[in-house]
Amino acid sequence: MSDNIERGAVIEWVESWLNMDRYYHPNGKHSNIPITELYALLKQIPAADVAPVKHGRWIEYIPGRWVYAKCSKCETVHDVMTNYCPNCGAKMDGGADDVVD
């Protein structure tokens, strides 16, 4: 599993690093940051708490006289088709990982 970090956190850390006095020349221009120090800085940024998005689609399901919808990911039957499956949380957009056997 790969670590995910927030872009804003990286920008904030790099900007704070750039603003340190030791990286300014007397003429006011930035000097280059040693790559080893930038690498050490990036390793300190905590990973973001993210979950992969599951994609699915609603499949029409008719058990009797009522029409229901079945989630293509968890196969749970629902009487209302929403943007997300209330059971497994799949986004109902028929994305690339929506595979129906």
Image: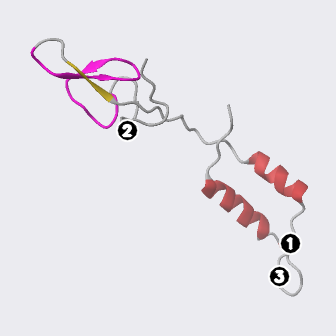
Q: Which mark, by number, is residue 62?
A: none
Amino acid type, mark 2:
Asp
- Please state the horizontal and vertical placement of residue 94, each as a whole percent of the image: 39, 35
Q: In which quarter of the image is residue 12?
A: bottom right
Amino acid under label 1?
A: Tyr
Q: How crowded is mark 1: few (under 14 residues within 10 Å), some or many (20 or more)?
A: some
Query: Which residue corresponds to the image point at 34% horizontal and 34% vertical from the top-left?
Result: 84
User: Is residue 78 a member of the stretch shown in magenta?
Assistant: yes
Q: Which residue is drawn at 48% across and 35% down?
A: 96
Q: For the magenta stretch, what is the residue range? A: 65-85
First in sequence: mark 1 vs mark 3: 1
Instruction: Residue under label 1, please give it.
Output: 23
Left or right of 76, for residue 29: right
Vertical side of 51 occupied by 20: above or below:
below
Q: Which quarter of the figure is the C terminus placed in?
A: top left
Residue that label 2 marks? 93
Circle on res. 29: 3
Q: Distance between the residues labelled 1 and 2?
A: 48 Å
Q: Is residue 87 above or below residue 46?
A: above
